[in-house]
Amino acid sequence: MYEVKNVTRVSSNPFGEFRNQCSTTLRTLLQEAFPDTTLPALSLNIPPNPEFGELSSSICFELSKLLKKSPLDLAKQIAAKAELERSSFNLVSAIKAEGQGYVNFYVNFAELARLTVESAKALNTDYGYVKTERPQRIIVEHTSANPIHPIHIGTSRNTVLGDTLARVLEARGHTVSRHYYIDDVGRQSAVIAYGYNLLGRPKPDGKPDHYVGAVYAITSCLLEIRKLKETIEKAGSAFEETINLKKNLDDWVAVAAELEQKFPKLFNALLEKINEDKNPELKVSQLLREYEEGRNEAKKLIREFSQLCLEGFKQTFARAEVSVDSWDRESNFVWNSDVSRTLETLKKTPFVVNENGVYEFDAEKAAQTLDLKKVFDLKEDQEIPSLTLGRADGTTLYTTRDIPYSIWKLKQADTVINVIGMEQTLSQLQLKIALCALGHTEKAKNLIHFSYNLVSFPGQRISGRRGRYVTFDEVIEESVARAYEEVSKRSPELPDEVKRGIAEAVGVGAVKYALVETDPQKRVVFTWDKVLNFETNSAPYIQYSHARACNILKKVDYKPPNADMSLLKDPLERDLVLAVARFPEIFVDAADNLKPNAIAEYSNALADKFNAFYASLPVIKAETPELSSARLMIVEAVRITLRNALKLIGIEAPERM
RNA sequence: GGGCCCGUAGCCUAGCCAGGAUGGGGCGUCGGCCUCCUAAGCCGAUGGUCCUGGGUUCAAAUCCCAGCGGGCCCGCCA
């Protein structure tokens, strides 16, 4: 990574160089001072205040127990020897014992600044993207929304998280393949195929996935009402459970009213057709069975509409600049008998029992027998619910189909990351245990469920079945429209085409940023305010900072000067350069620990520091030409870093706004 | 009933995995800053029982235990 006693001109990780120099120095000093002591692990932290230097060690607090001396005395003992060691490291300017016993390392700022700006300049589009020493083949499966309604704002969190993860891992040097699992086999597909067929398989008006979503919600709602009415009739009025059923029915009737208002023509057409049908439920199960069997009629029908929906998804992805390398059809795994073979093999294990004609996978027994609770970090006394493997009519179930699909993915990759909502935590666990039961324990360890929390609305829950959702498309549309207004206000002189281009980048960026900025484990409550935030802590804010940097460089027709970085004295300059220098460390942490939000957090913090710098220190009209040159170097490094950071979230950095 | 996740100012949020010095931001509110590189900006003020109670530790927002509150899951749905 770096060479001791040599001055590196370019580093993929400038702050990391400093960190290495500090820890090497510290280790040497400790070994010299306490040759007989086994040293605890060293870690260097960023102190709370620049007064205490740029890195700090609290090792003396631990040593004080072993050596029976006060931490401060130990720290002083170390610092006293420091002067000798330090001279061989160009980035360390001072080592001091401070506070109650901290050893603080002060950076040679001019050297670090020079290394940082030159590295950013030299590595340019690659600055910050520190390559891993152990590159892997990684599959990131994300979105995988059922092709039955448009991608709504809830699912879009999955899309943005998955896409960011893929970008980050790729930048880290892994070979990443983005997969989309098309769940076209389930009951939901049969429901909509049924409705679509009743309508005479029309060409959709408008965006195809939006049309499919309407047909699905209406069909599903009408079937639900029909089923509930029949159940209530059969149960008679005497039973208490009819109270719940009636409540449920009322709920669906309300949904029907909503849907009728939104799609009057479609609603009434479907209502009429479904009423003519003696037994819609039977038709739906028939369709489902025939599709799994691979009958031509059913195949043609279901593939036709699901393809329609996917075309809509592809349009959305194109606009959001999300790419997919492999579209995997679930039905293929049924038709090529992978699913049935897997099921047969699983049945031969001692963990599958037949209960009332259906096969159950006893995940608890498997986990105990194979000693898997430690492997998957579960409590020993935690009982894992069993998994039903198939329907009584012989058709398959989702998690069962996911087993051969997972094996297929794991064959092609060292690590498979499934971006799936946290509500599927249990089934993802059952899936992994099933893989182990099939003898794929090592593979199963490479399967990561990257879970994230739901997006909710202040009032009601998002529901595809009820047609209650705000689509990703309309959120982007609204955001872009708002950005266009804003650009027109600020830069009216620009040609309309340019304005539209900027608005697109800003509008789409704002939405993506809002979805990725929060810790995936936390719930996001959707509000237009949050998504359309164009101020501090938003993509537009970061983009704006980038545009300002570009503007300065453009004004002076920037050519990289050979600047004297020792002229930089202002704390604002220090903070800014240090932030740029730390980007590679932030990136590595985000990549290796799968923390997409860390990139968003960092981008905003860097923009903050740049804006503070921008507001109080003139660059072009700095006090001297030499200082101006040095500041220009910083501006260029910031421009590169902001652009590279945004790129990881899939957000464009326009040169003007 | 059991399991998983979350709980940090009026609201949103970082830090928690790998414990360290006065807990960072943002929104809001109040007050300032455009003859000077884009005010989508900057500066200042305001606001905190880090859910509660124990424990471990020289040191706890961070680790452990027990509660409380909210969400999700435990389906022949996905």
Image (cartoon, coloured by chain):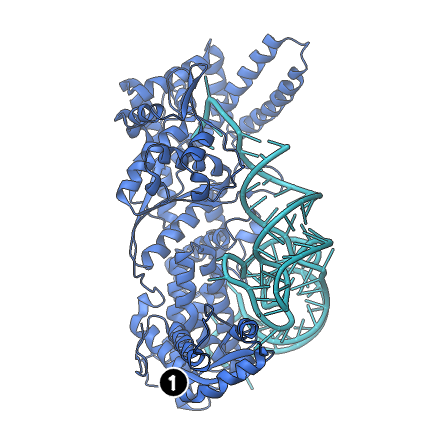
Secondary structure type for disc 1: helix
Q: Position of residue A411 (x, y in %)?
A: 27, 41
In this rendering, the count of numbered labels is 1
Residue under the image location 41 percent in, 59 percent down: A502
Is residue A122 visible in the rendered image? The answer is yes
Residue under the image location 50 percent in, 50 percent down: A520
Q: Position of residue A464 (x, y in %)?
A: 49, 33
A560, B72: nearer the viewer: B72
Chain letter of the residue beneath label 1 in the structure image: A
A273, A40: nearer the viewer: A40
Q: Is residue A162 above or below residue A22?
A: above
Residue under the image location 63 percent in, 39 percent down: A459
Residue under the image location 53 percent in, 61 percent down: A537
Chain A shade in the render? blue
Q: Is residue A655 above or below residue A161?
A: below
Q: Is residue A197 above or below residue A183?
A: above
Residue tagged by mark 1?
Answer: A629
How many neighbours does mark 1 have within 10 angstroms: few (below 14), some (14-19), or many (20 or more)?
A: many
Most extreme residue toward the bottom, as rendered?
Answer: A624
Most extreme residue toward the front, as rendered?
Answer: A36
Is residue A492 visible in the rendered image? The answer is no
Left or right of A168 on screen, residue B65:
right
For the C terminus of chain A, give its image quadrant.
Answer: bottom left
- Identify by letter the chain in cyan: B
A24, A49: nearer the viewer: A24
> Three-letter amino acid code at disc 1?
Ser
